[in-house]
Amino acid sequence: MNNSYYTGKINDIVSEVKKAVVGKDEIIIKTLLAILCKGHILIEDIPGVGKTTLALAFSKALSLKHNRMQFTPDVLPSDITGFSMFNKLKNSFEFKPGVAFCNLFLADEINRTSSKTQSALLELMEEKRITVDGKTYNLPEPYTVIATQNPMGSAGTHNLPDSQLDRFMIKLSMGYPEFKDEVSILKAKFSSSPLDNVQAVADADIIIELQKYISKVYIDDRIYEYMVQLSTATRNHPMIKLGISPRGTVALMQISKGVAAAMGRDYVIPDDVVSICSDVFGHRIMLSSKAKLSDMTAENIIDEIIKSVPSPGISAK
């Protein structure tokens, strides 16, 4: 199959999700690319801007088994991973799978639960498997976690540990809709639920096929070096206390391939890397006290780094 087939399939999925999520095309595309690059997505924003609708629209368009959990202080790790229960009839223990056993797991308001419960996600996000009572269970393929969180400092929130933040390929923010888009949302809500209009245009097999195609997208050695130079710059920047880990560089490489595939190319160019860099790096770096006192944001510093690192002379054919 040629590149146009895969690009067309990506466009079909985006078109379906757009039926439910109005005016957020860039967010939709980036979310899909993270799914197709076997990554997880963290969406941070205030309540009511469509975070959950976005995740549910993807579950319908991709025809994937999905589960949703509202994370609250009383949620236990076993609610997510599952637990062993003794069966009197069989005189043995049986494993009861938790809510995470699905293709698309929506973790709603993830930062409202305890750190102990949040840690239950570490293994399943990194290794796509869960260990309970010494026995390991593989999660189905494809597997993606879409987590939403309220802004830091909101009542009842707990900061996610750095080790968990690093496991999210990208972090996005929905933001308020444009005026005309909000009018469209009101009209759509009046007639029916926008999610009812979303049709399945893919399934697990197609997603796995797209994932395999994207993994084969070519990256020149100069692009690899460019990515490492960007990561290294975050580690040496005076305004950054904690820079990008190698896992973060790998995430940038993977989703840059997805950007190239969405543009109809089977090779990566520097613009692909730049277009997604802030979404990959933003939640991974820890700003220094000096940066906070200077009102610097992660996005400001990443933009500065991108401008300071020489781009390799590779362009689209």
Image: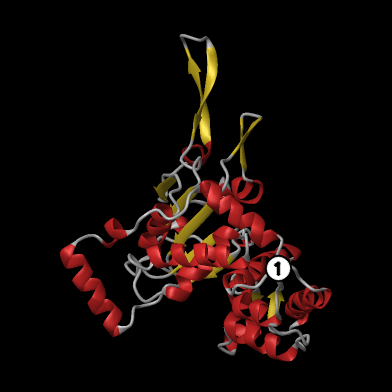
Residue at position x 36%, y 76% from top? Answer: 23
The colour style of the image is secondary structure
Q: Residue furthest front?
A: 1
Q: Is residue 205 left or right of residue 15?
A: right
Can residue 159 be seen here? The reply is no
Residue located beneath label 1 in the image: 253
Q: Quadrant of the C terminus?
A: bottom right
Q: Is residue 164 left or right of residue 315?
A: left
Vertical position of residue 305 compared to residue 60: above or below:
below
Q: Quadrant of the N terminus?
A: bottom right
Residue at position x 65%, y 73% from top? Answer: 265
Vertical position of residue 73 compared to residue 45: above or below:
above
Q: Position of residue 256 (x, y in %)?
A: 66, 71
Q: How many marks?
A: 1
Rendering quarter of residue 313: bottom right
Can residue 59 be seen here? The reply is yes
Q: Find numbered disc 1 in the image and state the secondary structure of the residue it sits on.
A: helix
In this view, the residue in front, 78 or 220, is 220
Residue at position x 48%, y 37% from top? Answer: 98
In this view, the residue in front, 78 or 184, is 184
Residue at position x 71%, y 61% from top? Answer: 216
Q: Position of residue 261 (x, y in %)?
A: 62, 69
Q: Is residue 303 left or right of residue 219?
A: left
Rendering quarter of residue 238: bottom right
Q: Position of residue 271 (x, y in %)?
A: 65, 82
Label 1: how many residues lie within 10 Å, few (<14), some (14-19) or many (20+)? many
Q: Position of residue 223 (x, y in %)?
A: 77, 76
Q: Amino acid at mark 1?
A: Met
